[in-house]
Image (tube, rainbow, N blue to C red):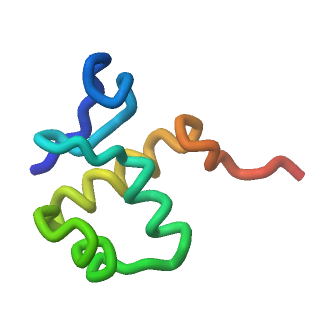
Amino acid sequence: MAKIVQTQEILGGKPRIEGTRIPVGIVVSYFLQGYTYHDIKRDYPHLTDDQIDAARDYVLKHPQKFNLEPEKA
């Protein structure tokens, strides 16, 4: 299974897909704009579905890192 890692020396410690320099935030921005896996893979053909899933799952588990916490009523 693909992993999300953070290394201070790479991307200033932003969460990224292991083995790449692709920040999780990029994948999230695609989904927020309504793009599909196919769209993401068109722009990043070396990414696997497993890597995209890992990025998506990471954001769902850590929404506060991406300003995605639900609004309070």
Q: Quadrant of residue 33?
A: bottom right
Residue 26 left/right relative to 37: right
Q: Position of residue 20 (x, y in %)?
A: 17, 44
Task: Determine whether, in the image, residue 69 is placed left or right of residue 47.
Answer: right
Residue 71 locus on image (x, y percent): 78, 51
21 vs 31, nearest the viewer? 21
Task: Give the left or right position of residue 20, taking residue 43 as reference.
Answer: left
In percent of width and height, residue 9 lies at 26, 18
Query: Does 17 appear above or below 14?
Result: below
> Measuring 46% from the left and 51% from the top, which residue is drawn there?
60
Residue 44 coordinates in the image, percent (x, y)? 22, 66
Q: Residue at x 24, y 32 (%)?
A: 5
Q: Residue at x 11, y 63 (%)?
A: 46
Q: Single out the residue that lies furthest toward the right.
A: 73
Q: Which residue is at the far top?
A: 8
Against 59, is 5 above or below?
above
Dividing the picture into quarters, in which one does residue 10 lie?
top left
Residue 1 lies, with reference to residue 8, above or below; the image says below
Q: Residue at x 45, y 58 (%)?
A: 28
The number of numbered discs placed on residues in the rendered structure image is 0
